[in-house]
Amino acid sequence: MEEMFHKKSEAVRRLVEAAEEAHLKHEFDADLQYEYFNAVLINERDKDGNFLELGKEFILAPNDHFNNLPVNISLSDVQVPTNMYNKDPAIVNGVYWSESLNKVFVDNFDRDPSLIWQYFGSAKGFFRQYPGIKWEPDENGVIAFDCRNRKWYIQAATSPKDVVILVDVSGSMKGLRLTIAKQTVSSILDTLGDDDFFNIIAYNEELHYVEPCLNGTLVQADRTNKEHFREHLDKLFAKGIGMLDIALNEAFNILSDFNHTGQGSICSQAIMLITDGAVDTYDTIFAKYNWPDRKVRIFTYLIGREAAFADNLKWMACANKGFFTQISTLADVQENVMEYLHVLSRPKVIDQEHDVVWTEAYIDSTLADDQSLVLMTTVAMPVFSKQNETRSKGILLGVVGTDVPVKELLKTIPKYKLGIHGYAFAITNNGYILTHPELRPLYEEGKKRRKPNYSSVDLSEVEWEDRDDVLRNAMVNRKTGKFSMEVKKTVDKGLRCGALQRSREIFLPRECNHRRPT
């Protein structure tokens, strides 16, 4: 298994090196004209039978290694989100220099024929995928996929973080502004993963925790918690006067207290401020809690078209190593929210920390409904700019990755050593199951309806220990060795439960980092 982990990681590392070298040699050209293979437009013709612009002929053939999908194993193609312009200079330049990844994609596949999808997700928004495949819009004629929203991108691009989101619900936020603010909060939640912790506070002349039961603390940003908070967002309404000083004091105290418990991310901390304006810079508060170290970054989102109070919000962000952006319409939300990820990635870029990350298990969305279930995990690594003029600024170019079927992990297990009724299983650094005989991601056998939390099933939910999570804690804390323990197993189709003595052996690859499965 360790050798398999190493092979996948090395394939990704070769892509990183090739991407950084290609970007280093490239000079940005605002007038660059380049016809690339657009994954949505390839092989499309107009009414006269001519190929569309960016839709040249792209040879596709079914390949059993890729679930019999029609692919091109010689070339990659590029998907651009529907809300972005295909020929934007930033997109065209990025696509141009990343074209050099094609030969590395092919070389990786030749070295390791078990590889499947390889890709580069750009910080500019485009997604280069190998082998090339045609993308089909949904029933509304759009493709909502944005690589920067995917867990593999976010985990590789940033470090774990503690976040307090402050939402202005004063009277001036009524109507569309509050709607935009709620959507902004929801989009921020989309960018948080299982390694992150958060809370949401609405403020006017008083503080209103979105979830009152979680007053003064942070919670893990798993799927269940995020959905719970989203439901409570709908209950917010605007009235009164906005007292931002009270909210900032509360946010700094929460982050400080939670950090001292040792339960959080023990890494980055941030305050997200969503408001239609600030009448002061509140420098005395920042001087009290955040200066001179500036350990907490401040990200400010100005809601609405007016810019009367923009200067104060810009100052607050810049004085606290954050970022300011203005969101005027609902269409602006997605692109503007993503900016904070690039700011949080700067320390990693400047220090050139090419951490390898592995995601939790998920179902391959490229499979048709009538095909068998395939669970995947993704190995990913960030790509940084090495150009002298930008290196000190910490510019993230994007993230490369490759998918690994969970069944490939299982092939490395020496089953002859397991014995009768023995089985192997693996978990993530958060204790979520990567593979286990009792992991059932679908509601019914043979049905294709997924359970909403299938990718975040904790080991303690299937391994019922007689003592308190001894096995789970040992694995999460990356211990190795053997021990015996009593576990409870169901019999008679779950109608009865009995105790059973089990021997457990924990194995951790030597190259393991804090986000690799164990």
Image: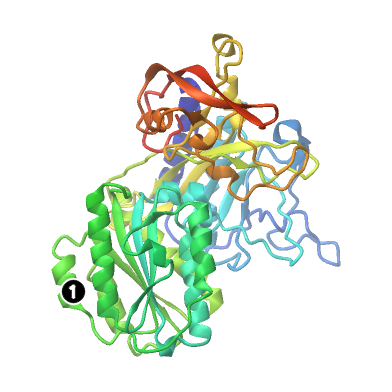
Q: Name the spot of residue 304 as percent of width and height, x first.
A: 45, 84
Q: Is residue 115 above or below residue 134?
A: above
Instruction: Identify the secondary structure beneath mark 1.
Output: helix
Q: Residue at x 20, y 62 (%)?
A: 294
Q: Residue at x 70, y 27 (%)?
A: 492
Can residue 489 be spotted in the picture?
A: yes
Q: Quadrant of residue 65?
A: top right
Q: How is the image coloured?
A: rainbow
Q: Is residue 480 left or right of residue 392?
A: right
Q: Tell me the quadrant of the picture where the C terminus can be found.
A: top left
Q: Is residue 302 left or right of residue 50?
A: left
Q: Residue at x 54, y 10 (%)?
A: 417
Tell which of 108 and 423 is nearer to you.
Answer: 423
Q: Quadrant of residue 496?
A: top right
Can residue 318 be spotted in the picture?
A: no
Where does label 1 land, which residue?
A: 285
Q: Name the spot of residue 487 as percent of width and height, x first.
A: 50, 24
Q: Name the spot of residue 401 as percent of width and height, x first.
A: 51, 41
Task: Identify which amino acid the numbered label 1 is placed on.
Answer: Ile
Tell which of 63 and 75 is nearer to you.
Answer: 63
Q: Is residue 17 above or below residue 181?
A: above
